[in-house]
Amino acid sequence: MKTVRIRVNGREIEARGGEMLAGALLRAGFKVLRRSPTGAPRSLFCGMGTCFECLVKVNGQWVRSCITPVREGMEVEVEED
Ligand code: FES
């Protein structure tokens, strides 16, 4: 499987080509993907695109990271701890 490089909050990480973004983020240590309006940490939940808990920004657009394949050069923003 081809290795691709993406940037997360300005930090470069490696991912496996074709894998979903959520998996790459969790493996890289990003346990919190976003915050609820009350500030509660949110992360992967359903893993199949229905709950929207895994939203992150990719190139400025909100996406569900569990159904978004990684692509070389993605610029990802997560709301870390
Ligand atoms: S984890 Fe539910 S939509 Fe991604």
Image (cartoon, grey):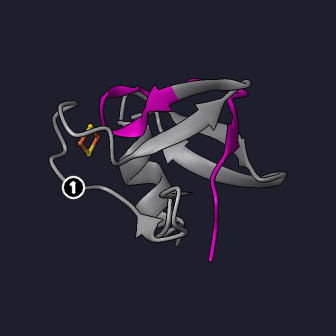
Outermost residue toward the right in this view: 10
On the rendering, which quadrant does ligand 1 occupy? top left
Q: Within 8 Å: ligand 1 and the Cβ of disc 1? A: yes
Residue at the image point whose x is 64% and y is 59% from the top:
79
* Residue 19 placement, left or right of 58: left
What element does badge 1 sit on?
loop
Residue type highlighted by circle 1: Phe
Horizontal and vertical percent position of residue 5: 67, 40
* Residue 51 placement, left or right of 16: left
Count the marks. 1
The residue closer to the viewer here, 50 or 67, is: 50
Q: Is residue 6 above or below residue 31?
A: above
* Residue 28 placement, left or right of 7: left
Q: Is residue 32 above or below residue 50?
A: below
User: Residue 72 colored magenta?
Assistant: yes
Which image quadrant: the C terminus? Answer: bottom right
User: Residue 65 colored magenta?
Assistant: yes
Which segment did they paint magenta? 63-81
Kindly tell me whether residue 70 is visible in this rendering.
no
Q: Which residue is mark 1?
A: 45
